[in-house]
Image: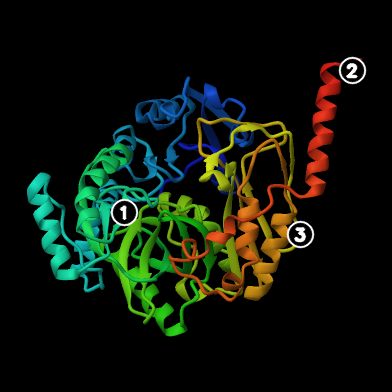
Amino acid sequence: MKRKFDKILIANRGEIAVRIMRSAQELGIKAVAIYEETDKDAFHIMRADEAVCVGPGPRKDYLNIGKLIDAARQTGAQAIHPGYGFLAENPDFPEACTEAGLVFIGPPPEVIRNLGSKVIARKIALETGIPVIPATTNLDQGPPGARQALDFAARNGYPLMIKAVSGGGGRGIRQVDNEKELLAGLQRSRSEALMSFGDDSIYLEKHVHRPRHVDVQILADNHGNVLHLGTRNCSIQRRHQKLIEIAPGGLEPALTAEICATAVKAARAARYLSAGTVEFLVDPDGAFYFLEVNTRLQVEHTVTEVLTGIDIVREQLLIAMGEPISFTQDQVVERGFAIELRINAEDPKNNFLASPGLLRVYQSPGGPGVRLDGAIYQGYEITPFYDSMMVKLTVYGFTWREAVDRMARALRGFLFIGVKTTIPYFLQIVTEPDFIAMRLDTSYIDEHPHLLDYREMDREVDKIARLIAEINAYEKNPYAQ
């Protein structure tokens, strides 16, 4: 059924809210922003056609489904886009939208519910003949669960991965290397899973040694079309959370074709709709295993957009309106290389602790092949209440080396004064020989601890910082000597 939107509400904040607004506005669709009082100076509010305060905050009102539904009704929005994050993967949200007569721009609730459980997702993959890593089903609570875990360890050996059944984003995952760590980790993982996802279900999975983490971007519509947009390499991770994303995935052509076809097969088996990502691990011998399906737009969708020229958010909106995907599989062409990373207000030398503060000076790079997705501005107060990501930087190069050199140039073109950032750490990575040679797997960060050995600030930036401090002091007391 086709339905036309002229206004949507974006149930998110920051750079992803701005990103969605741009595609909606290009289609002539008005975008409604939401905000909490603690976030009233946010950039996404300025870019919206209208905005609604959903509560005092911080954080809790952004996740209040009832308040979001009320905001959509109040503004006359016909649909809601969740962006990414918890609401994008909560099946209760699309159900609430449907009950309120609103369109949820994403997969149906039953798809989110099935694929949100890694155990059910694995079952779908197995029934479809897709290779999966050996794993348990849900482990029982207490001693029975411990016995199940020890039996699995006896059959498969160590190391093993303890994983939360629900959730994503690298949370709820723990590697254990022996029986002592396994038994201690079971309860700890349950507690973390309950705190993060409201579900303490966990399972065990065999560890794959030095794999590459490869994603396949998919799109599916209501007309029977399921297409892939190629691969991404997301192997550079810290504590199972992605730091840098690269497209294409760097696999041999035959393996790329096979893994992409498998992703489409998995999406069809799950009766998928909208944009999503099928994730795989690829071992050093080229064998690949289904990992999970992310039922949402991902942070790293930008590298795929840069490489293919396809606006994934635009396609999401059109699919939600009942339109078919606007291109065919043979029109999807990857050319060159793209790299994306997230510049956060964090201190890598202090365990990546958030670095809130007033952004006194902000300058950004530009030029050929540089894309910025951000939600900050000079004079913006970065608070401790929200995600520390300030801007996503995506670069394109016709060759891998051009993309790497362009990323280094773009990183050096930023100027942030007022907060610490992850830029010096990323500069270490993109100028490191193994990265330049594209020798990348999930062990990369652990095997390169020296990447944290960098200078805090170069002399020119230090001079500017001192000058800013002098100007601020003068403005407070111009008569001081």
Residue in the picture at 62% in, 64% down: 430
* Pick the front one: 338 or 345: 345
Identity, as a three-letter code, of the amino acid under mark 1? Arg
Note whether residue 393 is visible: no
Kind of residue at disc 2: Pro
In this rendering, is residue 288 above or below 103? below
Q: Would you name the residue on which mark 3 appears?
A: 367
Residue 7's label in the rendered image is: none
| SS category of the residue bearing label 2 | loop
Vertical order, 108 against 285 (above or below): above
Q: How many marks?
A: 3
Label 3 SS: loop
Residue 358: image location, x then y, percent: 67, 30
Residue with the mark numbered 1: 174
Disc 2 target residue:
478
Figure quadrant of the C terminus: top right
x, y percentage for residue 267?
32, 64
Cα distance in 3D space between marks 3 and 1: 41 Å
Instruction: Give percent across and percent down for residue 281.
Output: 36, 69
- Residue 408 lies in quadrant: bottom right
